[in-house]
Amino acid sequence: MKTALSIADNVRNGSSTAVAELEQTLDTIAARNDELNVFLHVDHDGARVMAEAVDAAIARGESVGPLAGVPIAIKDNLCQRGIPTTCSSKILEGWRPPYNATVIDRLVAAGAVPVGKTNLDEFAMGSSTENSAYGPTRNPLDPSRVPGGSSGGSAAAVAAAMTSISLGSDTGGSIRQPAALCGIVGVKPTYGLVSRYGMIAFSSSLDQIGPFSSTVADSALLLEVIAGHDPLDSTSLPESSPSLLAHVDDGVAGKRIGLVKELYEGSSPAVVAAVMGAAEALREAGATIVELSIPELRLGLSAYYLIAPAEASSNLARYDGVRFGRRVDGEDVTAMMEATRTAGFGAEVKRRIMLGTYALSAGYYDAYYGQALKVRTLTINAFARAYQEVDIILGATTPDVAFAFGEKAADPMAMYLNDVFTIPTNLAGDPALSLPFGRGDHNLPIGVQLLGPGRSEAQLFAAARTLEIADGRA
Amino acid sequence: MSVLPDGWEMVVGLEVHTELLTKSKLFCGCENHFGSEPNTNVCPICLGLPGSLPVLNEHAVELAMRIGMALHCTIAPSTFHRKNYFYPDQSKDYQISQYDLPINANGYLDLPDGSRVRIERAHMEEDTGKTTHLGGSGRLAGADRSLVDYNRCGVPLVEIVSAPDIRSSAQARAYAAELRGILIATGASDGRMEEGSMRIDANVSVRRPGAEFGTRCEIKNLNSLRSLQRAIDHEALRQIELLEEGGTVRQETRHWDEDIGETSTLRVKEDAEDYRYFRDPDLVDLAPSEAWQARVRADMGPMPAERRHALETRLGTPTDAQRDAVVVVIDLGLERYVHAAADAGADVAIALSRAANELAGVESLDQLSSDSFVKTVAMEQSGALSATQAKAVLGELIANGGDPVSVAAAKGYEQLSSDSLEATIDELIALNPDEWGRYRDGDDKLAGFFTGLVMKATSGKANGKAVVAVLQSRR
């Protein structure tokens, strides 16, 4: 499997070209996209223009960025100028954003070549990509199973070797969970590390854009490119992008790693075994393992399913048929708005809008939304206490390996429980990553999760790299 | 001076929205400009396009702080909330506003009559666009077409909420006028009610003096100070009539119709939206540092009350009419002319009167230097120009500039010699023996009759005071 680092090296040293790399990506997509439904839109012409520009810059002897000529897949909730952006919703059908998300500008400045937009659960609400209005994405490792979600398309693009890297977004696990189910690396950065400008909001206080890749180093590189302060996002951290790639081989010697039972208990035996194996591998690499309990994390799922829908109910109000996207005519403006939203949104989106509207309503706010905010504060404080004892926390990413289509789709609670290990990090605003470690039922990959305090990405990548080597993936 | 029947008192609180005079909108870089072609001052952010995010305009915060400081408010750490409701001219279908933690709270405004109205809060929020409903009902529900202009969407507003301390429509008007003066003096607003840059809603209730507050109604569409005053009186009388007939006041929002001079129901309380306020996760808390506040405070000039006092001090003991003139001059920012005249030793009363009358309502005073104004006042004071002539000279100076002496000469305003004036008067006395007889017998009103004739005969060149002096000497 080609890595982004090797592609960029080869493009820069002349042993390959951006155009050749792009054509290979386009060929792979053409060969497998009908079966897997990874891409909703492939920007053949635009990508070629960008690839040619990279090659031309190299020919002129200009310096090109760290992702020179690397094709990359973009989750379809990130705006790219002139490219259809749907959030996998009928309500945005036909809409082409007139502007770029900050991450797109940074990718292009680094020489990367965005090749197209990948499938997701509608408005990033889901854990299987079954909620897409444009059909589910299939797991490249076993097409009878889901790739996870909501960033299922971006995870599948990397797992199917269509691209070496891709961008997803993670509100409650939407990068880490599909990374785990597809056997790749996925990172949810510290809240505010990556600009949200141009990312179509699901839950603004939880959303973060992050990388997918098959190797730890590629995710470190990609995160370095997209991170750093952006004046267009008020919640963006003030610092410039951290140095990550330079630290991936720092190892874990002397690090204290917390094995938190709330983050793996109740998982399948294979998943528990993988987490234990990872702990053992880290110990062998010089870390100290500390067994911990953080009971507050059990409250995370409930708080999340109030906070995220509450914000979503407001964020998704603008899809009213007035200014963009789909419009279904009605007798007057109010009727038009109702008809548009009724026809445009899928069932899960409607469910969450109603949940959120209810949670914020007069008379219910204190009992629901207000209470959830308190739980969020408890979660933040609980993690902060834990990080006084340990540097990194280890757990599972998901309770089990990739599930089959339809297995959980009929039962929202069963689906929501898939995110029980990933959600607390979003509530706390801390970084976490998932990487494959070991295999479970049907020889499917298992994801283990590494969590750390805010801005500890470098240390998480170093620990992940240690596990990558231990798992024989180096 | 109340229009209410005996035994009734009105209780009024005002909510004043003012657009801030910033270059750009509250959360994006689009131009904040009234009167542009529809939908030209727009971008992904103020259009609420998916993925766009707001970034707070620092200058708007400064202007909001200036308003708070001028109103003696506490400037406190504040947050932005979302007010959720669906309306087509609101691009995100929520309005970013401040809710439980406004930037300015707990101030007051002292009015020229010495009364004090407490200010509960002065918070920041974004304006909406403008919808025009065409055909059908002409309203949102049932219109054939609705056109939306988003130029105003995202324009920064400050909403100033008074306590229910106002007890008459005249006081309400004085409050609004004084507040308008403050908004202009702080540079926060141009105060143009006709362009909607200052908009007022009035909460009106009535009660027996000393009783608990009655049920209030909120009156909208008050587009001038005159409307404000009329609407409040009308609404208070309507409520009193209802109560005296044994009815009750229903809490509702009412619309003022200036043409027919009445309010009518817009919506009742039961229809009120649940706005589902919650803190906007796209914005961070706003906590202006002490140093920032000090910088803003240092940049502020004097407020109208202080400026009125300065002018009144130069008048000595002003008459009521002069106090009114001072209010006008300060409202219009014309006091530098009066101060210049006073500094030059000219008559402050004449200068005040000319400023309050001749300079008021003029579109541009660019052509009129304070020097020329002072000279004209001095010429009137010395009798070289009559009042009528001085007004005409000022009119010419305002229109085309120049030097008052040459303007007066060009208009032929050389003073008549006293010989030729006396000759003219004697001639007119001879021609009107009856009137003269009555004047001589003590009917002073006829001085005006003769002055008029003299003015006509001399084409207005005579000085009125001099004419009366001659008439007196002939009596």
Image (tube, coloured by chain):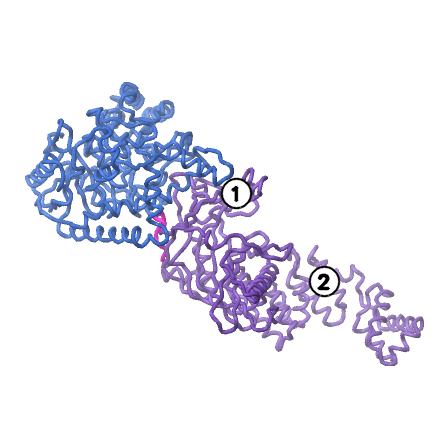
Chain colours: A blue, B purple
Q: Nearer the viewer, residue B76 or A59?
A: B76
Q: Which stretch is magenta?
A: B279-287
Amino acid type of disc 2? Answer: Pro
**Chain under callout 1:** B
Residue A356 position (above or below residue A367):
above
> In terms of secondary structure, what is the magenta stretch mainly?
loop
Drawn side of residue B364 relative to residue A129, left or right: right
Q: Position of residue A91 (x, y in %)?
A: 40, 33
Q: Quadrant of residue B38?
A: top right
Drawn side of residue B288 relative to residue A457, left or right: right
Residue B196 position (above or below residue B239):
above
Give the label on residue B404, or none: 2
Residue A63 can be seen in this image: no
Residue A83 position (above or below residue B339):
above
Q: In the image, what residue occupies the spot 24% across and 52% down? A: A375
Query: How packed is label 2: few (under 14 Cα within 10 Å), some, or many (20 or more)?
Result: many
State the CA–CA distance, disc 2 to disc 1.
61 Å
Nearest to N terminus: mark 2 or mark 1? 1
Q: Position of residue B158 (x, y in %)?
A: 47, 56
Q: Position of residue A456 (x, y in %)?
A: 20, 45
Q: Position of residue A318 (x, y in %)?
A: 42, 41
Please give the residue where the numbered disc 1 appears in the rendered image.
Answer: B141
Q: Residue furthest left?
A: A284
Q: In the image, what residue occupies the spot 13% across and 42% down? A: A265
Q: In the image, what residue occupies the spot 71% across and 61% down? A: B394
Residue B102 position (above or below residue B43):
below
Drawn side of residue A119 relative to residue A328, left or right: left
Residue contact at pointers 2 and 1, CB within 8 angstroms: no
Q: Quadrant of the C terminus of chain A?
A: top left
**Chain under callout 2:** B
